Amino acid sequence: MSSKLPSREQALILLRQSNCSPRVVTHCKAVAKLALETAETCQKRGLKVDLGTVEVGALLHDLGRSKTHSVNHVIAGAKIAKAEGLPDSVIAVIERHLGGGITSVEARELGWPEGNYIPVTLEEKIVSYADKLVETSKRVPIGLTISRLREKNLFAAAERVQRIHDEIAKLIGEP
């Protein structure tokens, strides 16, 4: 692949060629479906959002789970995406989808490369948010995700997820 945005089919092929489990592929498809619906709603409300980046980024957000199921799947996925020559916009979605984002301090504590792991663009936020609403292939309430983060004493992550929820809900006109 080149720095050109791959098609949906090419993204699915990459997941399978990278040896992502069927469960991970199912999850990625479900996240992509919800993320695309959210992006389309944003677009209908007059917001500028790249639907291709949202769909492909969502499909590939857990690409690194082909190597590890730890939080480090973010770094592994970005490495694979870079090696495949994927666009920076997709690499950023992969790097920034976890837990509403990872601060530079948290990244340093995890031993990650120096960088920004907090969602910045609307596309990144939409994929991160959709990922928090999908367990395997089923939609779950955002409150459940937030309460689980709090139970694990991940209060900062819970706050970031709540902020993304509030922002996206406002953009798409949900209470």
Image (cartoon, helix red, strand yellow):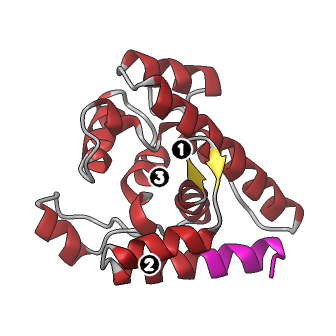
Give the alpha-carbon distance from disc 1 to disc 2, as whole Å. 22 Å
- Asked if the residues shown at circle 1 and circle 3 are in contact, with their CB atoms under 8 angstroms apart, the answer is yes
In magenta, the rendered stretch is 165-175
Image quadrant in which you'd find residue 26: top right
Q: Amino acid at mark 3?
A: Val
Give above or below for 147 relative to 38.
Answer: below
Q: Give the mark, 3 or 2, whose residue is nearer the N terminus.
A: 3
Give above or below for 16 relative to 156.
Answer: above
Name the disc covering residue 158, or none.
2
Give the foreground label among 1 and 2.
2
Helix, strand or loop for disc 1:
helix
Helix, strand or loop for disc 3:
helix
Image quadrant in which you'd find residue 58: top right
Q: Amino acid at mark 1?
A: Gly
**Label 3: how many residues lie within 10 Å, few (<14), some (14-19) or many (20+)?**
many
- Asked if the residues shown at circle 3 and circle 2 are in contact, with their CB atoms under 8 angstroms apart, the answer is no
Q: Is residue 171 magenta?
A: yes
Q: Which residue is mark 1?
A: 57
Q: Tell me residue 38's x, y (percent).
A: 74, 58
Q: Which residue is mark 3?
A: 93
Q: Quadrant of the N terminus?
A: top left
Front residue of 157/149: it is: 149
